[in-house]
Image (tube, rainbow, N blue to C red):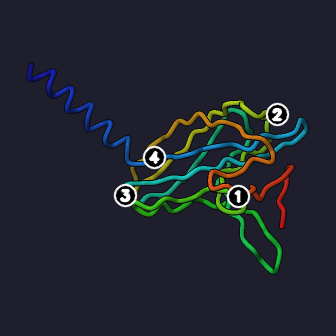
């Protein structure tokens, strides 16, 4: 009986460790047939200070964490090495801001598809947590969960 109790306690601790980071309302923008890139968007909350350090998906040859910033009156998108996740604060990945960029797509992402996406989050202690997501695709003109039109269109950016 003690062995069973220890196993249950160990599983509870393992589950608690896995629950350090949560993802809400993930979605991927659907593409047109020849489009080679799209974005993934969501809210990420970490119980402790951490960083989103890696992303991958079998639907894309390249997956990067990106930010969009205004530079000399031009909206620019660039890869970043990681995204800070302050303890207890929701970090929004959204069109026109931080997002996960899926490039070199292996095929069209259609409205209603479910896209596998893996995120790797690293805590201040160096320990990593892997999150396996099944992310629904929304139409090109999809509204964000907050009700705003997305800022990324057909294969590019809008100013």
Q: Residues within 10 Å of mark 3 (few under 14, many from 20)?
A: some
Judging by the rendered image, the residue that carries numbered circle 1 is 148
Front-lying residue, 127 or 38:
38
Q: Are marks 2 and 3 in contact (CB under 8 Å)?
A: no
> Along the polypeptide, which appears first: circle 1 or circle 2?
2
The answer to whether 77 appears left or right of 9 in the picture is: right
Residue 139 % position (x, y) = 78, 41
Residue positioned 73% across, 38% down in the render:
60
Q: In whole angstroms, how far apart are the C-alphas of marks 1 and 2?
A: 24 Å
> Along the polypeptide, which appears first: circle 2 or circle 3?
3
Dot 1: what SS?
Answer: loop
Q: Residue furthest top?
A: 1
Occupied quadrant, residue 59: top right
Q: Quadrant of the N terminus?
A: top left
Q: Residue furthest bottom?
A: 72
Occupied quadrant, residue 49: bottom left
> Along the polypeptide, which appears first: circle 1 or circle 3?
3
**Numbered badge on residue 48:** 3
Judging by the rendered image, the residue that carries numbered circle 2 is 108
Q: Quadrant of the C terminus?
A: bottom right
Q: Residues within 10 Å of mark 4 (few under 14, many from 20)?
A: few
Marks 1 and 3: which is nearer the front?
Answer: 1
Judging by the rendered image, the residue that carries numbered circle 4 is 22
Dot 3: what SS?
Answer: loop
């Amino acid at each position: 009986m003690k062995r069973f109790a220890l196993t249950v306690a160990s599983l509870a601790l393992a589950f608690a460790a896995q629950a350090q980071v949560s993802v809400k309302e993930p979605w991927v923008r659907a593409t047109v047939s020849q489009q080679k890139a799209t974005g993934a968007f969501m809210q990420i909350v970490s119980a402790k200070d951490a960083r989103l350090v890696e992303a991958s998906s079998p639907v894309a040859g390249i997956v990067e964490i990106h930010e969009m910033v205004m530079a000399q009156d031009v909206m620019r998108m660039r890869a970043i090495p990681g995204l800070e996740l302050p303890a207890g604060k929701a970090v929004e990945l959204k069109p026109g801001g931080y997002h996960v960029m899926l490039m070199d797509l292996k095929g069209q992402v259609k409205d209603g598809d479910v896209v596998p996406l893996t995120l790797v989050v690293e805590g201040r202690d160096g320990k990593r947590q892997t999150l396996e997501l099944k992310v629904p695709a929304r139409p090109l003109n999809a509204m964000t969960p907050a009700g705003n039109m997305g800022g990324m269109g057909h294969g590019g950016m809008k100013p």
